[in-house]
Image (cartoon, coloured by chain):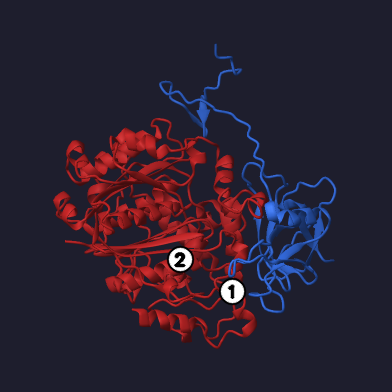
Chain colours: A red, B blue
Amino acid sequence: MSGFSFFMVSASFGADFDSERKTRMLIFGKGNLRVPKLSRDVYIAAAGMTDFRKFYPEKQTVELCLEAIRMAVMDGLGMEPKKFREFVNFCVYSQFADHFGDQLLAASKVHDYIGFDPIGNIEIKTGGATGGSSVLAAIMSIASGFASCVPVIGWERMDEVDTRQGNAYIASAACKDFESELGWSYTTYYALMMRRYLHEYNPNRETLAKIAQKNHHYARFSPYSQLPGDYSLEEIMKAKVVSDPLTFPECCVMSTGAACLILADEETAFQLTDKPVKILGIGAGTHTLRTADRRDMPVLLLPNETLEMYKDRKNDWPGFTSFLAARFAARQAYHMAGIHNPIRELDLLETHDAFTVSDIQTYEDIGLRPYGRGAEFIESGEAYLESDLPPERKLPTNLSGGLLGSMHAVGATGIFQIAEIFWQIRNEWEKFHSDEKYWKKYGKTKPEDFKNLQVPNATRGMAISHAGTGSHVTAIIIHRGW
Amino acid sequence: MIPSDGATKLAKKWFKKEIPGELLVRFNPREIVHAHTYGGLSKFFKGLTEGVLYGTKCWDCGGPEGNIWLPPRVHCPDCWRKMTWMTVDPANAKIYSHSTTNLPGAGFKGTVPCPLISLEIPKVRTRFMSYLSKFAEDEPYIGMPVKPVFRKKISTYTILDVSWVPID
C-alpha cells in the first residue's frame, strides 16, 4: 500500500500545475496518505433511536438517551439492561453544541442516568460530523484493545431556543471573526456554494429539487421522521427561499432526539448477537473552517479515478464546489475496505444531506460521478430503491429520509445514519419501521400506502458524516459480519 | 430568601404549540457579554476603521508574487513562522459567488435582504467573504466588479466594518 501512496504523492504534483499554483496548494507527504488499519476487528451489535421532533417538551435529554439505548438493548439484542451493563467497559457520547442544551458536561448526566458509572467515557465534538467522529472514537477504543464493548449515544436538544437563535448557535460553528457576523446562518454559506456550483457546472435546477423530493418521500415511511412529505418539484422550487437559491424543503430540519449504537470486539459481538455488522472501512478528513481559505490544488484521486479524467479541468479544486474533507475521508475508507467502484460495491448509502447542494457535491467527492457530473447520479435513477436498474447499478441513498426529511439532531445524526444501514444489512428495516408499535409509540399513523424500503440482500453500506462547510467529514463503511 | 426575578417565566406556548398542562417549561433568559480579543489580528480590524484592507504573506512559502492571505493569519500554516502584513489593493476585485441573507440568525446587525459575497481579488490567494451594502435589482452576479467601502465612523470593530459596492 505504501507504493500506492507514493504514486498518489507524485500524482498530486503533476505537470499540469505551474509553479505559481504550486505555491498555493496543500502538499501531501507519504504519512498523510497512509491507509488506516485496525489492530483487531470491530463490530456493531445493536442500534436504537428515538423519534425526532422540532419540539420535544415531554422528555428531557437524559430520558431521550435512555430510550435510544433501551431500544438497542431490549428491542435489538433482546437483553435485559442489567445483563447488558455487565459487558460495557467504555462509553462515547456525541453532542454538537453545549449551547443548545445549556448544560456543560451533559454526557456525565447521561452516563449517570443510564447507570454506567464508574466506567470511563469521553464526549466528542466535531460539529455536524460529531456522530461520525463518535463512532470513529468507539471503533478506535475497541480496535486498540482498550475496550471490548462500547455504547455510542448521540443527541441534540435544539428546542430550548427559537429557530433564529438556533441558527445563530449553529453559525457559531463558522469563524466568528470573519464569517458569523455576515448572517449568522449556515444556509447562507451553503447558498454561496450552490450559486458557484450552478455557475461552474450548470446542472438542471430541478435535479437539486429531486434530492429534496426523494428524501422527504422516504421519510414518510419512517416512524422516527420529523418532516415527511410528498412534494412536487414545483412546490419545492417555489417554496419560500431561505437563502437564494435554497428553498425551505432543500434545507435540513432542526431536531431534538437521540440515537445509539453498541460496538464490540468480535468475541463480545457474537455473545451479544448472531448477526453483528463489521466495520470494513473508516476515513476522517478535515478542511478549513472558513470556506474562503481553501487553497487550490490538484484533485486528490479516488481508486476509481485517473489523472486523465481531470487533465482539462479549469476550475479551482476543491474551491467552493467540492469538499476536500469528504474526498479525503472517502479515499481512506475505500482503500481500507478495498472498494474500487462504490456504486457497484456498496448496497446503500446515507449522506449528510443538510442541503440539496451539499448532497450533490458529496456524490462527486465520494466518487459516484466525476466532478461536475453529480446530477447524473440522481437523473440515472441510481439513487432510488424503486429504480428499474439492476441492483449492481443502484446505490439507494438516504432511505432513512436523511437530514432533509427525517432528522438533524446534530450529535445524533451520524449515529442515526449508521443505525439505519445496520438494520438494512441485518434485513431488519421492516422490523424497525413497519411495526405499528413504533408508529403508535410516537403518536403517529402509519401511511396507508406504506412502502417497504428494505434493500434486497443488503450486505454493505456507507455513511458520510459532515460538519461546517466541510470542516470535518467521516466515511464509515459497514459490512455483514456473520 | 431568593429574590423574585420578575414575572412568571413559564412558557405556555413554544414553536406555535400549546404546552400540555402537566409539563413545566421555564424560560431562562440571560444577557452575556464576552470580551473577545483579536490578538495578533487586531491590525486588520483597526485597518478597517482606517479604510485599509490588510492581509498577510509568507515570503518563504508564498513565492515572489501574490498569495496574500485575506482573512489574514499571523502565522503561516505551512512553516509556522510569522507572516508579513501587506496592504491589499482591491482594484479589479470581482464577485466569485453570492447568496442572500433573508432570514438571519439572532445577533445579525445588518438589514435584509443582505447579499453575502465572496471575492476574487488579484494577488490574494483566498476568496474573502463579505457583504454588498449597495446593489441594484439585477445584482449581484458572478464576475461583478466591486470596490470596498469602510465604516470609519461608528465602527463596529467587526468584519462588518468593510462592505463592497458596485464599481460604477
Q: Are marks 1 and 2 in contact (CB under 8 Å)?
A: no
**Residue labelled with disc 1:** A296
When the figure is inspected, residue A464 is found, relative to residue B93, above or below; the finding is above
Q: Residues within 10 Å of mark 1 (few under 14, many from 20)?
A: some
- Residue B118 image-quadrant placement: bottom right
Left or right for A397, reference A253:
left
List x then y, in percent, for residue B28.
55, 28
- Of residues A380 and A89, the one nearer the viewer is A89
Which amino acid type corresponds to the residue marked 2 in the rendered image? Ala
Can residue A442 be seen by looking at this rendering? no
Q: Which mark is residue A341?
A: none
User: Residue at position x 44%, y 55% from top?
Assistant: A129
- Mark 2 element type: helix
> Outermost residue toward the top?
B1
Q: Choose the circle earlier in sequence order: 1 or 2.
A: 1
Can residue A313 be seen by looking at this rendering? yes
Which amino acid type corresponds to the residue marked 1 in the rendered image? Asp
List x then y, in percent, for residue A13.
52, 83
Left or right for B116, reference A403:
right
- Of residues A401 and B131, the one nearer the viewer is B131
When the figure is inspected, residue A283 is found, relative to residue B2, above or below; the finding is below
When the figure is inspected, residue A265 is found, relative to residue A94, above or below; the finding is below
List x then y, in percent, for residue A231.
46, 53
Q: Which mark is residue A326?
A: 2
List x then y, in percent, for residue A142.
27, 55
User: Residue at position x 30%, y 74% from top?
Assistant: A338
- Which quarter of the rendering shows the N terminus of chain A? bottom left
**Dot 1: chain letter:** A
Q: Residues within 10 Å of mark 2 (few under 14, many from 20)?
A: many
